[in-house]
Amino acid sequence: MPSVYAAGEFDLAGFAVGVVERKRILDGKAVRTGDALIGLSSSGLHSNGFSLARKVVFERMKKRIISRVPEWGTTVADELLRPTRIYVRPVLSLSRNIRIRGMAHITGGGMSGNIPRALPPGLVAIVERGAWTMPPVFPTLVGAARLSEREAYRTFNMGIGMVLIVRPGDADRSLRHFRRRGVPAFAIGEVRKAKRGDPGILLAGGKP
């Protein structure tokens, strides 16, 4: 990370490994045409695209860490250091009541790099622009960086931190479940049969 680590400095990181019963593994094989995409709102950047975000904010926008950005309603420090929303407990509790057919954590690679990994061959995710409330940090960064739509959805989470794939009949129940637990959730699209040459996701509708 340029300008973050000086010569001789290093970062010590940890990780966790989980286990799951074989019969409960989500490998995408259960996903079917017509299944609903449930998007769980992100709290902000979620630590992805930070090299670009820092370059845009400090070099192109000429902001300082204490600068207040009117569009964000907060300072640069408060926005860039906003804690990542964690979905473990509400997702696990939902899985005890309905069958989640697929799941994608929207981390590095954005929606276009993660949703396709939750789909079996021959299917595509149709994501409806404007179906969710996008935190204002994303339009600001995308505009200042002059990113194309394709680059934006590959670099940032664009306001969606996790996507669940459920049966159409379970969509409303899933939305109510997350909203009761304080996690903003949105029906952001569906799974359809892919045509020759389709990428893993297609964006539809108006711009968010």
Image (spheres, helix red, strand yellow):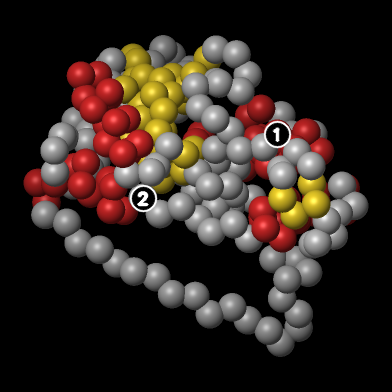
Q: Do the residues labelled 2 and 1 touch (CB within 8 Å)?
A: no
Mark 1, secondary structure of its residue: helix
Image spot of residue 41 (x, y percent): 47, 39
Image spot of residue 106 (x, y percent): 46, 43
Q: Is residue 14 left or right of residue 33?
A: right
Q: Which of 98 and 172 is in front in this view?
A: 172
- Say which residue appears at 78% left-offset and 33% top-offset: 143
- Say which residue appears at 55% left-offset and 20% top-offset: 129
Alpha-carbon neighbours of circle 2 within 10 Å: few (<14), some, or many (≥20)? some
Q: In this view, does 140 lie to the left or right of 19?
A: right
Question: Where does the N terminus fall, quadrant-wise?
Answer: bottom right
Q: Nearer the viewer, residue 69 or 191?
A: 69
Above or below, 66 against 52 in this view is below
- Residue 139's tag is 1
Q: Mark 2 points at which residue?
A: 87
- Say which residue appears at 27% left-offset and 36% top-offset: 177
User: Disc 2 versus disc 1: distance between alpha carbons?
Assistant: 24 Å
Above or below, 143 against 108 in this view is above
Q: Is residue 79 visible?
A: yes
Above or below, 37 against 54 in this view is above
